[in-house]
Every structure is written in structure tokens, then in C-alpha cells.
Amino acid sequence: MTYEALAPHFSERALKMITSANVRQDDVKNQFGHDEIHYDNNAIEAGDRYINEQRGYILAALLTPGNLGAWVAFGRLIHTAQDFYAHTNYVTMWLDEHKDPPPTPAEIEPLRKDLIKSPGLYSGRIYFPMDMLAFFPFLRPLALKFLPKDSHGWMNLDAPERGYKFDYARAAAVKRTVYEFELLQKILPPEMFARFTDK
């Protein structure tokens, strides 16, 4: 998703660092006590704050020599932005409004304010230890028997095996990644933005 959205805009070395920082957000140390990173356990407002903090880190990093800090912060930012669509019921709410016939994944609108601010928006709760077991394919069917429908195990759209909604979550995440890039293009002064893209 990250390469698809950003490859035209960054140098190869910048893109590698951004992607690496994105992937590292799923390290074990970030899975416990950091719901804001993944929008887990209904940490909607905390996830939004985390994204805003990373924007601030990007600006602060670009006020100093070097680009690494800005690239790492952007990788963290887009990981959380992408997880929003995989870990909340945003895709489900959007699809509920578009049933006859359902639109293609490419048509999803990732930033519908009425859905983002809806009291019906929520994310998957982590139920220990069953949600951990659901990460293992051979244990997943057993774990799901014991997990409630609002669990991360039932709700997450992290892989194609999760069904047709995965394609919508992925498409929304790609669009959101482009949006976050374009927002920085508007916020940053031209010379700072040129440094950031490393082109």
C-alpha cells in the first residue's frame, strides 16, 4: 500500500525508510499498551492524536539537519492512518450506505466526516488470550468460537483471507496515504518539502 501510494513522490532511499518505519509499528513492543498506534480497543481519539503528533515530529525533524527523523515519523503516521480502515467498522458503515449494487473498492471515500465522527464508529477490542491465538492460522477457527463479534479477531481486515471487505479497507488506506502526503505538501514550505521527498 505504501509503495503504491508514495512511489512516484519519494526517492528510493526515502521510501525504504518510510516503509521500514511503517512495518516496525507492528513489532511486539507496540502491540501491548499502544492502542493509539493501531486504533485498537476503541482508541479513536487517541489514534487521531497520535497522527497529529507524528505530523509535528515531521516538522520538527525537518527543522534540523537530515531527513531520517521525518521519514520515520511519516512511516509511523501512515501505519496508524492505514490501520484505521482495517481495525474499525468504517468500511462496514460505508458499505451499508451503498448496497444496490455495491460499488467497487476503488470508489470508497476514506474521509467521510459524518462516518469518522459517527457515534457508531468503533474498533475491535483485544480480548486476551484468545485474540492472540487468532493470529495463528491453525488456531484461528478455535479462537473465533470464543471471541465476541466486537473483537479484533472478528473485525480486523488485515489480510485478503478476511473476506471482500479487505479490498475496500486496502483501497481506503491507499487513498488516505496519498491524502496524508498531499496534506504535508500543503503544510510544509517548498524547500522543506523538497528535502522531505528527497527527489
Image (cartoon, rainbow, N blue to C red):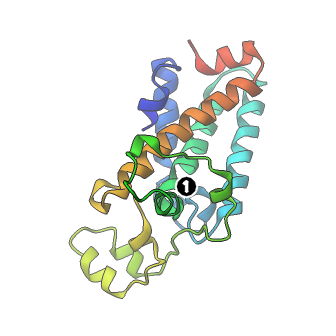
Image coordinates for residue 47, horizontal then vertical, percent: 65, 57
Which is nearer the eye, 62 or 112?
A: 112
Query: x, y percentage for residue 24?
Result: 48, 47
The N terminus: image quadrant: top left
Residue 61's x, y, as percent? Answer: 73, 30
Residue carrying label 1: 84
Q: Is residue 34 shown to the viewer in this render?
A: no
Say what secondary structure mark 1 lies in. helix
Q: Residue furthest bottom?
A: 146
Side of 62 where 40 appears, left or right: left
Quarter of the rendering containing residue 197:
top right
Above or below: residue 188 compared with residue 175:
above
- Residue 12 quadrant: top left
The residue sitting at 34% across, 75% down in the picture is 133
Residue in front for this viewpoint, 89 or 148: 89
- Quarter containing the C terminus: top right
Q: Residues within 10 Å of mark 1 (few under 14, many from 20)?
A: many
Vertical side of 77 occupied by 155: above or below: below
Camera-side residue of 1 and 59: 1
Residue 161 location, x and y as percent? 27, 59
The amino acid pointed to by label 1 is: Phe
The residue shown at (73%, 46%) is 52
Q: Residue at x 46, y 58 (%)?
A: 95
